Image (spheres, helix red, strand yellow):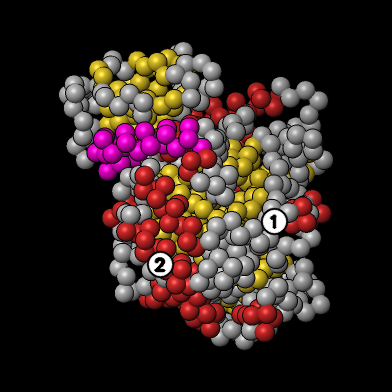
Amino acid sequence: MNDKLDSGASTRRTFLKGMAGSAVVTRLGQLGFAADRTRSGASAVVELEDSILQVAFDAKSGALTGITWKPLNWTIHQRPELGISFRMHAPLPDRRDNFILGQRQTAKKVEKLPSGNQIRIVWDDLVSEHGGVLPIQLSTLVTLENGALTFSASLENESALVIETVEYPYVGDLQAPKLDAPLWRRQMWYDDLQSQELHPHFNNAIWGYWGFDSPMQTGASSASSFCLIESIDQGIYVGLHDPNPSYLVQYTLEQKPGVLESIHDKTPAQEAIAGTPVHLEFRLAHFLFAAPKSIATMLPVVLRPYRGNWQAGFDIYKGWRKTWFQAIHIPDWAGDVHSWQQVQMNSPEDELRFRYSDLVKIGEECAHNGVRAIQVVGWNRGGQDRGNPCLDTDPRLGTFQDLRDAIARVQAMGVKIILFAKFVWADKSTEWYQKELYRFAACDPYGEPYENPGYSYRTPTQFAGINNRRFAVMCPVCEQYRKIAANEFSKIIALGANGMLYDEVCHHATVKYCFAKDHGHAAPAYIYAGDVPLAKTLQSVARSQPDFLFAGEAPQDILMQHYPFSYFRISAASTPAGRYLDPHASLMVAVTGFDDRETLNRALMYRYVLSYEPYDFKGQLGDFPLTLEYGKKIDALRHRYRDLLWETEFLSELAASVSADGQPYHLYSVFRNVSGNRAVVIVNEDLNSSIKVKVELRDARNLRAATPEQPDPLPTSGTLVIPARSATVLMEGLELGQSL
């Protein structure tokens, strides 16, 4: 092998020798691939190779035995003997624990195709653990092109069993770039890029210890169609490249045989412990539920390494996203600089906070303060999270006409009304559910409806979970239920609202499949496959109102094509993944603090619309004057410099670097307009002290700085003093005294 690989082996040997008291087993000759893999003690392999990746498959078993990223010398899959081809789950009538292990199979065919960049692997007549030989064929095609490895597969099930899952591709020995390098799994959820450590600590995260033999982590494709396996300045992108996935895929990582010690979840540094190889498995579980005598085509999986941080991984997805993403029309006002107020009229505990006629006063206060829209929550019968999916008006708050008239009067002030709705649940305590809606609830394999335990409001009884309204999880794959949802939605249209915010559009609790046999769909049906048909049904109802706004709570990227306005909440740990994914998407965040400068500054930094929510959307704008006044200054700054802060491309931290006291500083973001001019928003979240930062922009010219409180641009060299709890915008290309 080359010198770089030999150097890596030497580094590993040195590290292992330094592990005092460890039982260490070394195999230093297997860090890369030798051209001759038929020598004594090694199996013949079939390889794919380009300038970026070198990939090996065992010629007899078809197992993936090695992956090397050549430019950075990262041996992603290291030990051939830990290679695995696939795993299937084929439950027997009297024993569900019946797996088909790839390690026990011999491939019928492992051949490199004439193209030179593809390998076809076929397994036939598979040996199961407890059900004997089964007439099942798995055919796969692996393609290597420009450093991207694509795994395609199909399953032909001639057996009498349902094949619930096929786990493929399967990386049996996932390695960090270096033995002492950290490794994380990162996936999208709620417009954020969430992170879970894999190495040198591995926590099972979600699943209880009682359910597995070795610690395990999973991530669902229903939340994110791709995941990143990331180290420092490099990573691996793994994505499902099908814009309309018809079933669930789980990204699964399993640390075998387990952790070294369970207090800190430290992973063993040695190659074997207790006589068992230490390794991290990474596999994708395709929940096919392939019926007997059926053929199933699996979603294509793309694996591709990248150099850089998470943005580089996102760039791979963004490139593919451009080939299929098509957003629906969004009203001009919703795409412009503006802010909202969210207000709750009623809750399940009968707070009866506002009457419909009170919306007029709320609208007047919004108009006075330049707030452009009101999201009205709990306006429906029973209040927020009661009576779902019913969207009748509540006679205790007024009449249908009272609400319609109030909406019209607020709209006349230039303020839009967005009505809150929710179609994912049905309130099980209602007569409607007990007489009719129960028929459209998603059911588990035993015929029982899935349930969400409901949410707690206001009273100690609810906070103790005693009288909460329990929810059935409704089945959007069922056409009859989609018609019911559309009928309820039509009431919003009849009220003359400017839009709807579909709450919890992003999930169906823990439910992934509906097994009901009388919903008019195949059983089981992937619940998330019903979300787009439901969206299209709702859009057809609003066809007469082309400027009607469809908004949702943190829709997945697929649903952003139908709910192009996303509302969510952020924290100090949030990553602006949704903004980087789509620089011009309408993304809105909740602002709840009474002097919430930190959230407001982040909204400036990440180009988020503001949703004012005093008393957690139970109060009025005047309840938090400090937050309101600073938020108005931020929006005024964005209006003034819209070319650089709004109608612009979001680059995250790319194209500039910021330092404080000689150390890298990361609370900043970079925007670039169509002329190539850049703006850098830097935030100081220290509660008491100012900071001095130095901003470096290559080939920058005419640098000017402004703040929400001092919006006139002043010349600067790029070195700035930012007061505590403040933000500064550095802009290039402005002449002194100029605004955009």
What residue is drawn where x is 71% and y is 24%? 17
The vertical placement of 663 against 604, above or below, is: above
Residue 528 position by quadrant: bottom right
Residue 220 position by quadrant: bottom right
The vertical placement of 310 against 544, above or below, is: above
Foreground residue among 97 and 48:
97
What residue is drawn where x is 35% and y is 21%? 695
Can the viewer see residue 199? yes
Image position of 156 (left or right of 373) = right
Q: Which residue corresponds to mark 1?
A: 456
Helix, strand, or loop for circle 1? loop
Mark 1 residue type: Ser
The vertical placement of 53 against 638, above or below, is: below
Mark 1 touching mark 2, by CB under 8 A? no
Mark 2 residue type: Asp
Expressed as whole percent of the image width and height from the top left, the position of residue 730 reads 31, 25
Q: Does the magenta portion include 530? A: no
Q: Nearer the viewer, mark 1 or mark 2?
A: 2
Foreground residue among 199 and 8:
199
Image position of 446 (left or right of 695) = right
What residue is drawn where x is 69% and y is 27%? 16
Classify 10 Å Cα crowding around label 1: few (below 14), some (14-19), many (20 and above).
many
Q: Earlier in the sequence, mark 1 or mark 2?
A: 2
Q: Which residues are magenta?
A: 624-652
Mark sitting on residue 405: 2
Mark sitting on residue 501: none
What residue is drawn where x is 61% and y is 60%? 352
Toward the top, the furthest residue is: 661
Can the viewer see residue 309? no
Expressed as whole percent of the image width and height from the top left, the position of residue 9 reads 59, 30
Expressed as whole percent of the image width and height from the top left, the position of residue 415 reads 36, 54
Query: Overall secondary structure of the magenta stretch?
Result: helix
